[in-house]
Amino acid sequence: MRARLVGLSLSVSPFEACYVPVAHEYAGAPDQLDRDHVLGRLRAWLESPKHPKVGQNLKYDAHVLENHGVKLAGIAHDTLLQSYVLEAHRSHDMDSLAERHLHRRTIRYDEVTGKGASRIGFEQVAVERATEYAAEDADVTMHLHRTLYPRIAEDDRLLEIYRDIEVPVSVILQRVERNGVLVDTGALARQSDELGRKLMELEKQAYEVAGQPFNLNSPKQLGEILFGNLKLPVVKKTASGAPSTDEEVLAKLAEDYPLPRLLLDFRGLAKLKSTYTDKLPQMVDPKTGRVHTSYSQAVAVTGRLASSDPNLQNIPVRTTEGRRIREAFVAPPGAKIVSADYSQIELRIMAHISADPSLRRAFAEGMDVHRATASEVFGVAPADVSAEQRRYAKVINFGLIYGMSAFGLAQNLGIEREAAKNWIDRYFARYPGVREYMDRTRALAHEQGYVETVFGRRLWLAEINSPNGPRRAGAERAAINAPMQGTAADLIKMAMIAVQGWLDRERMSSKLIMQVHDELVLEVPEGELDAVRERLPGLMTGVAKLDVPLEVEVGVGANWEQAH
DNA sequence: CATGTCACG
DNA sequence: ACGTACGTGACATGA
């Protein structure tokens, strides 16, 4: 949102590229063409949808150009997305791609700008050196496109994922990022004060119980207090062998001792304050007055997006205190926040892929799926399922999506492993199609080294044939999870395209402002509220016809919390 | 920069 | 006997 253009590099044929410096600034820098003059001359071409462009991560270029008032159009190809569609599990930076596919060792950005404290801005790089770096950048992109795109084009389904999903989504994401989200910084500041007071109080109490002051934020110091001074039992150890002080451990110790409870409360509030109520206001862009996240489209191996700087996909929701943070995500005067999320999307996908009759029936008949599962597993009528039974069934259903083990289920439910194994056996007896899906997926993963989403996105499993047992088992669980998580990612990307397409065609002012894996969030002027509420669910459920119905829940409010 | 922890779907 | 539920990103600490 704030980067300024220093120069442009372009290539129209292999091994030929140019660099146009426009804003290099250092003692003795040569005279350069004026930036606005250059952009003025290039504008018609840059903004023309009829003139196709190829780049590496053009979402970024589009932002920089838009910072100068140029709206990039004609994004035909993106080598970042090509690499991601072909090999989501590998690195996609240009240096790696050039080595892997072109056997070329490129000039690295760090080599040009330096790194750490002595790093200089690109505007201070000598024009000659900048030319070598930047022109090579354009040339490598050209070669990568000529190498990677044919590999996608030879597979119909990969081509659809790339051309019909990833490329259009990148264009939409740039707009979503630019739209930003309005945040009530005053409300967050008040929450920070309140949290600060509560933290001071908890800290004071902790010092009293511990008999001495210590840094509550330091797992190391905390471990010394708990397990050294106070001689509390070590419940489990961390990967490096130190006694763990994580939530599970503290919860267990809290049954018998006072200090762990204080620490659990402290940690919960400290997280909210440092990550959210203190940080988010600092992330507001001074120019737009809004928070602009960045979506990474080639990070998550399953096809999901990732959000960073700030991450808007992990804003608290599970606790009452946490939800207050969502109240600070607001609509401007005259508008509302609209949230629409897919209901039970991954379980529906499991029902579709596995074709299990009972699971499909549960969704077809619009049942509460956890209640239906409880009914089957516990052998009672749906109406007679207890709250406890439904809770168990919900944990089992989530476990299935993750490729659960008896151990994992036991731990999650706090029951014996034998008992957990028993529930799993009963589940599979009732849903044989699901077991067959899991077996089939495991076998396929071993044979091919990859699994696929419903729409043909390919998910590679590097360790599926590892001689290391635990690693192989991990890859098998990932293989089971990936088609469900990945298909859900495909669906919501298609939904983003459908929704933005509708908003554009209807010349609406409503804006997509966030994507949270199974949820789209929009900022909607009140005049468009009825239309959006009416059309949004159908647009989202209509992107694909699975063997089970898709359902979308829509909420409206003055803020994100109310809309949920 | 690694580690531990914890926020989300 | 081991080590175990999938996918992410950010923060604080401490080397």
Image: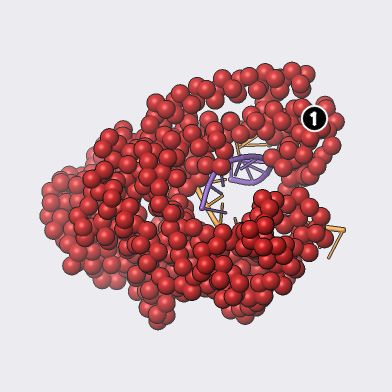
Chain colours: A red, B purple, C orange
Does residue A470 appear anywhere in the picture?
Answer: no
Question: Is residue A17 or residue A421 the one in the foreground?
Answer: A421
Task: Specify whether B1 is left or right of A164.
Answer: right
Quadrant holding the C terminus of chain A = top left
Q: What is the quadrant of residue A198 in the picture?
A: top right
Callout 1, which amino acid? Tyr
Q: Secondary structure at mark 1?
A: loop
Q: Residue at x 23, y 67 (%)?
A: A52
Q: Position of residue A281 (x, y in %)?
A: 41, 31
Looking at the rendering, in which quadrant would you find the N terminus of chain A?
Answer: top left
Relative image position of residue A241 (x, y in whole percent): 77, 45
Q: Which residue is mark 1?
A: A257
Question: Is residue A310 rendered to the left or right of residue A268?
Answer: left
Above or below residue A324? Residue A544 is below
Work out whether A170 lies above or below A431. above
Which of A396 and A452 lies nearest the eye of the viewer?
A: A396
The residue drawn where x is 75% and y is 27% is A259
Q: Residue at x 47, y 55 (%)?
A: A517
- Identity of the residue drawn at 55% across and 35% down: A320
Chain letter of mark 1 equals A
Q: Quadrant of residue A165?
A: bottom left
Q: Position of residue A294 (x, y in %)?
A: 40, 48
The total of numbered circles placed on residues is 1
Question: Is residue A181 found left or right of A425 in the rendered image?
Answer: left
Task: Please give left or right for residue A231 compared with residue A302 in the image.
Answer: right
